[in-house]
Amino acid sequence: MGKLGKKARKFAKKNLQSVLKRKRQLKSMFKKKASKRDEKDEAENLEEDQIGKSSGRDLECENIEDIELDAVFSDESDVVEDDSESDGYLSEGSSCPYPDENGTESDLDEDMDVDNGGAIELLEQNRAICIELTEKKKKLERLQKKDPEFSKFLESYENGLGKLRDDENYSDEDNTSEDGTESPEKGTVNLRKGKLLTSSAFNLLCQLVREHRSISALTSLLNEYRAACHYGSEPSDLHDVALCSGLQDSKTFSKILIFMLQEADNIFREMLGISSSSCKKEAILELKNSSKWKTMKPLIKSYLRSTLFLLNQVTNSEILAFSLVRVRASVIFFATFHPLLRRLIKIAVHLWVTGEGTLALHSFLVIKDVASVFSSDCFNSCLIKTYKAFITHCKFVDPVSSKHIQFLHNSFIELCSLDVQNSSRKAMVCVEQLSKILQTGLKTKKKEAVKRICSRQSTNCINLWVSFISANVKDYDLQPLLYMIIQIINGVAVLFPGPRYLPLRIKCIQWLNNLSSASGVFIPVASFAMDILEYKTGKDNGKPGKDFNFSSTIKLPKHWLKSRKFQDKCVSSVIELLATHFAQWSCHITFPELATIPLICLRKFLETTTIERFQRMVKRFVDQVEQNIEFMQRKRDEVAFSPKDHQIVDSFLQFEKSNANASFTQYYKSIIEKAASSKPVMNQKIRCPSFYL
């Protein structure tokens, strides 16, 4: 085939499919090469920027310092919904058994499967209606000022219309209540409007509810209860100040509150056919589509909302405690009112942290019941809110608040024990945050980072999760959490080796002893304890020093380092901590090797010290340890198994482990009793190994 002509070649370059395909391939290949270069350049630029930013200043560490321990979790339920702008009174004259509390919004938006778009449209319509009504009201006010005769005409018209409505209500009721029972007296439904609630009228309503279970009478009582709960609140919260004028005196006020709090739960349960001992939310969810529930739902919701408002307004601890007890009895009714349930959790956590005595106890019982009855999401909300409240509250500790903080600590551990697996995941997040803070302090040694590690928040957080692990490590797999918290405690002890941080070092050793005793894992603490004996205490000036709460202190004042009490504290702490450590392993086959190095250090201390009371204390401890070593050596000589036989090694001296009359056990108990009696100011519990209890 001959060569193509010039025109033919030109045509082929432009139009042949093979040529066009080749061009597309070349074009895409060049594009890919260019994009790879661009991506490489961008990656290099990012690396250079990161290197430039990290040189001299670690921005990541600075960001870690800005994160607070109480802000580790993001709780989306912090926003409390269902704060309606209406007065919340139930409709007493309407024949509809399912009125809306707002008068405008449909109650369907309380369900969790509501359409957000429809709710937004309803809200916009409500706003438009409110604006239109406000404008008409202003026009009427202007018209009344201009024409007084017209205003008199309006008043006469309203009075006549009101009488007509009353007549209609009486004729519609026909002396029967909504549940079909006869009503002994006409007009009881409308006692709420424009009239004082006398004691006789209140007693009549109570009788109708108790004996006949009258829905209309219960509605009137709930409206009065709502007015009593809102009594004394700001007028701006109500549409009309006169709405609270139905209470005649303080006795009626008290009767309404006491009656509704005592009887409401039983009344609701009986009308719905729920057992008084039922505490399962399924009992409510099964009735969700029934006619009974549709009738009772607005009444129950009104009662719950009014009670929560009362808990937010009242300051008397006895009234708050009584109200919490009654709310706790009605916890299952919150199953279909999720916004109210979130509000209940928020109020209960606040009263748990700020309350004292029985108020804090009843608040925690409400939190515990909510976490037990409802789903895991609700448990997470309770756990996160209580953790944040505890960490925030323990920033400042004094001898007065230390007892309350210990109660918060113990109750939080009890809450975590309801769902250990879920709680362990939250604990891992908190411990990882502590680890980041510690790494920042170890790397940078900045003053701000070091302060955050030894702050009361950090130490209380460590103490919190140490207690959680100690309480549950035998029954659940918490090994990753255990090893991570051990590393953090070791890092804290290494970061603060000075004598002024003696209380913090003692706490670290106590934490490790507790973890070792609970888990059965050997944790070496003797070196940390022996370092305390090397503190330079200065010249003994003979001054005893001022007493202070040692358990709530992290760093000692400088003047205390030269006092006689500091020297006593160092030596006695070493003996107590080593005694606790040795007591756990006193019957273990490796005890002679474990105690060898600490005995060498203690004998060296006996040679250097000239203070008689220290010599006497340390000498007695050394003698007790040596006696236990001799006992263990004799027992080891009698056995015929190898150290490789782990099962037999673990069962070595099982009888002696359970025997509380052993020599070293008795000595350990005397040391702990003496420490508890001689230091009442510390208020610090030193845990006894479980096999000696």
Image (cartoon, rainbow, N blue to C red):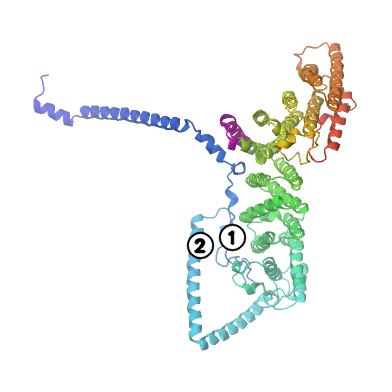
The answer, for residue 274, to whether it is visible in the render is no
Badge 1 marks a residue whose secondary structure is loop
Quadrant location of residue 674? top right
Q: How much space separates mark 1 and mark 2, taking CA atoms? A: 13 Å
Residue located at (45% from left, 32% from top): 50
**Residue 582 colored magenta?**
no
Q: Quadrant of residue 228?
A: bottom right
Give the numbered dot on residue 83: 1
Query: Against 190, is 447 above or below?
Result: above
**80 shown above or below 60:** below
Q: Amino acid at mark 2?
A: Leu
Instruction: Give me the residue at 57% from left, 34% from top.
Output: 446
What type is the residue that disc 1 sits on? Asp
430 magenta-colored: yes
Placement of the C terminus among the 4 image quadrants:
top right
The reply to whether callout 1 and callout 2 are in contact (CB within 8 Å) is: no
Can I make out residue 563 in this image? yes
- Left or right of residue 248: residue 111: left
Callout count: 2
Q: Earlier in the sequence, mark 1 or mark 2?
A: 1
Query: Which x, y percent locates residue 359?
Result: 75, 54
List the residue tagged with mark 2: 123
* Magenta-tinted stretch: 428-449
Residue 625's image quarter? top right
Foreground residue among 289 and 145: 145
Figure check: 368 above or below 458: below
